[in-house]
Image (tube, rainbow, N blue to C red):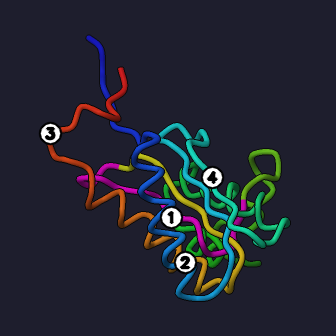
Amino acid sequence: MPRSFTTLVLSDAKRMLAAGEARAASFGVAYNIAVVDAGGALVAFTRQDGALIGSIDLAIGKAMTARLFDKRTVDLARMAQPGAPLFGIQQSNGGKVVIFGGGLPVLIDGEIVGAVGASAGTVEQDIAVAAAAAAAAEITRPDNSEEGRGP
């Protein structure tokens, strides 16, 4: 019997990026923001004018890391310190795991449907921008929407 799953789609990602950009504007910092789907594939990315070039890969990596491990990257950072249970995790997955705060799994109705990553400001600002983006997905998806359902 076929199974189905819910995932973020482009319309979700566009709302999320807009919410993240609005939060970034409140800090006066140009941001890079990435959204990945339930499988960890990039759905959408934005680089605001003047955003740090070095933060492009970090934003995408944070989103992918949050989805790979279904954890906030700030939590992984704590667990990856010397002597902690996940020390060295950033070397896994081809070294593409990013353990700076600013990556969050995105949930709809308690189910992880993707993730978001933000990078350019302080860790606290990155977390706030990502949280604003994630909240936009959670509150705007209609309950009966078939959009975002996978086979």
Which segment is the magenta one? 98-111
Whether residue 105 is in magenta: the answer is yes
Q: Which residue is mark 3?
A: 144
Q: Which residue is mark 2?
A: 127
Q: Residue at x 85, y 66 (%)?
A: 54
Q: Which residue is mark 4?
A: 45
- Give the foreground label among 2 and 4: 4
Disc 3 residue type?
Answer: Asn
Q: In the drawing, does residue 135 fall left or right of residue 74?
A: left
Inter-mark Cα distance, 1 to 2: 8 Å
Q: Label 1 crowding class (10 Å Cα cut-off): few <14, some 14-19, many 20+?
A: many
Q: Which residue is mark 1?
A: 104
Disc 1 residue type?
Answer: Leu
Inter-mark Cα distance, 1 to 3: 25 Å
Disc 2 residue type?
Answer: Ile
The percent position of residue 14, horizontal first and vertical second, equals 47, 52
Q: Residue at x 56, y 42 (%)?
A: 43
Q: Which quarter of the figure has residue 76?
A: bottom right
Q: Are marks 2 and 4 in contact (CB under 8 Å)?
A: no
Inter-mark Cα distance, 2 to 4: 17 Å
Q: Which quarter of the figure has residue 81?
A: bottom right
- Farthest-out residue, top: 1
Q: Nearer the viewer, residue 104 or 91?
A: 104
Q: Are marks 1 and 3 in contact (CB under 8 Å)?
A: no
The percent position of residue 145, horizontal first and vertical second, equals 21, 37
